[in-house]
Image (cartoon, grey):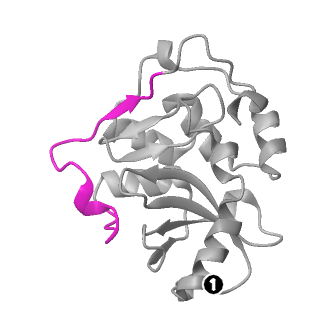
Amino acid sequence: MAMPLDRLLQIVVPPSIAARHHRDWAAAEERLGRPLPQDYKDLIDVYGGGSFDGHVGLLAPPPTRVGSDLAEYNDGYMDDLTNLWAITENRPASLAGEGLLVVWADTIDADSLNWLVKPGQSPQDWAVAVLDADLGECELYPMTCAEFLAGLFSEEITSRILSHHLSSEGHTFRSYPLNQGQSFSPSSQR
């Protein structure tokens, strides 16, 4: 495990090993159309799909609850953002260049935690882009998702978008319940 994930483990207790599930990373990457950062894979292998402080929800490859499948959530995501920005004309200046957003977590307020994917850039170098629900404000953090979460929950990072929603009494993680008997193949999620 990478050092940022080790830091996060000291701040937020992960679920028991019984809550962890095998993920088909190759299928998830194929469906998403790109490789995923290793620190994200390590994060999901330890925590799985679930919610930090009842606010920040991790998206994950199946098995996960309906609506939290990483690849499914990203189907058409960037196209939808581009269309909304064209209508509202409030695209954040920090996102004006080349690149696209791939969401890896969301919040109960419809904010999103994304990777800013630029052409030719290694997944390990993707910055975290926190996009406000109104789509007009974006904070960029040149670090991995595990590093960002560890910094956010240790209060070394203050996000205008996220920080005021998080617990100040200690942080929690709750795994999403899985629907019993539900198939999690990509075709069953449509």
In this rendering, the answer to whether 60 lies above or below 55 is above
* Residue designated by label 1: 86
Q: Which residues are magenta?
A: 156-177
Residue 59 in view (yes/no): yes
Left or right side of 47 for 125: right
Residue 24 in view (yes/no): no
Write the residue at 77% across / 48% down.
Answer: 32
On-image quarter of the N terminus:
top right
- The one nearer the camera, 25 or 124, is 25
Outermost residue toward the left in this view: 169
On-image quarter of the C terminus:
top right
Type of secondary structure dominating the magenta stretch = loop
In this rendering, the answer to whether 103 lies above or below 118 is above
Q: Would residue 166 be counted in the magenta stretch? A: yes
Left or right side of 152 for 50: right
**Count of numbered circles in the view:** 1
Left or right side of 18 for 75: right
In this rendering, the answer to whether 154 lies above or below 178 is below
- The one nearer the camera, 67 or 139, is 67
Write the residue at 70% across / 70% down.
Answer: 100
Percent from the top left, x then y, of residue 174?
Answer: 36, 30
Q: Would residue 36 be counted in the magenta stretch? A: no
Instruction: Tell me which amino acid carries mark 1.
Output: Ala
Percent from the top left, x then y, of residue 57?
Answer: 44, 44
Write the residue at 51% across / 33% down.
Answer: 49
Left or right side of 166 for 17: right
Percent from the top left, x then y, of residue 103?
Answer: 59, 56
Percent from the top left, x then y, of residue 180?
Answer: 54, 12
SS assignment at label 1: helix
Category of crowding for the residue at label 1, using alpha-carbon neighbours closer than 10 angstroms: few (below 14), some (14–19), many (at least 20): few
- The one nearer the camera, 81 or 29, is 81
